[in-house]
Amino acid sequence: MVKVSDLQFGYNGRLIFDGLDMQIPRGKVTVIMGPSGCGKSTLLSFFGGRLKPSRGEVRFDGEVVPFGAGERLYAMRRNMGMLFQSSALLTDLSVFENVAFPLREQTDLPEPLIRILVLMKLQLVGLRGARDLMPSSLSGGMSRRVALARAIVLDPAMIMYDEPFVGLDPISMGVIVSLIRELNDAMGLTSVVVTHDVHEGCSIADYVYLLGNGKVMSHGTPEEMQNSEQPETRQFMRGLPDGPVGYHYPATDYGEDLRGNG
Ligand code: ADP
């Protein structure tokens, strides 16, 4: 569904990706992991054509993703749902109107059909009964589920989740984990989940990519990743404080430093 080839990109001259290659298989849940700041969210921006590679390309369903604006990009984006960490609900609109929003903006469907589509999506996330609530009266987990209903209301081929587990209590987290899997399988979606959470990520992944040093550090099924002997992969997957990724910020010799010669 997505093919990233030789992607190179930096912010203000600081390289974030240096020849990154990745393939997102159709119909599966692919989890992209890596330490904070390694470029996971930035990578999703490339999938949606919000950033321009300085080298390489991203293809969505066989077509190169154009950058910035234009009909071709908008048509592509209609096929990509996105769930942001913040949920990003419109605070002045009810749950129903938030989910209806993309339909009103991007289609000319008649009101009775909009109503049915919205109620079907709310039913999928278990919130049909909450349709008249305002975002301010929703819990964090409910907000994320409303955002999820909105993200799938146009029936995209692919959905991207940016850190979907952050800040949720264990029950809401469990709900989101099972929703991601159920929606993927029931709607025949392709799902991409960006997370630094090894445990939750592995529990829903069909396939895992681990990013580091501007590239894909390793990839495989969750089992392969958890049993990997590659030192960086092992350190990240097991949460070891020290390893190839050092605990200490680079410094002068410790003894010399204490003696005042550092
Ligand atoms: P992750 O999602 O893995 O935590 P991000 O993709 O958010 O990482 O960020 C990767 C790196 O790029 C970080 O060091 C971050 O500070 C930097 N960065 C992100 N967005 C911008 C931006 N708009 N301008 C400059 N630097 C940015």
Image (cartoon, rainbow, N blue to C red):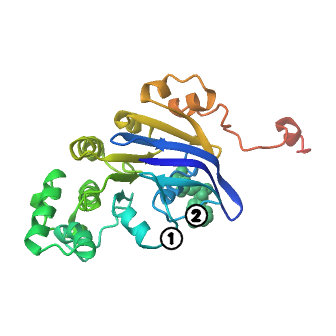
Residue drawn at the location 11% of the way across and 74% of the way down: 111
Sequence-first disc among 1 and 2: 2
Placement of the C terminus among the 4 image quadrants = top right
Secondary structure type for disc 2: loop
Q: Residue 129, position in %: x, y?
A: 9, 59
In the image shown, does 41 or 152 lie closer to the viewer? 152
Q: Residues within 10 Å of mark 2 (few under 14, many from 20)?
A: some
Q: Residue 122, position in %: x, y?
A: 16, 58
Q: Determine contact: label 1, label 2, CB under 8 Å.
A: yes
- For the question of whether residue 132 can be seen, the reply is no
Identify the amino acid type marked 1: Gly
Identify the amino acid type marked 2: Lys
Q: Residue 157, position in %: x, y?
A: 32, 53
Q: Residue 23, position in %: x, y?
A: 48, 42
- For the question of whether residue 104 can be seen, the reply is yes
Marker disc for residue 68: 1
Residue drawn at the location 51% of the way across and 70% of the way down: 68
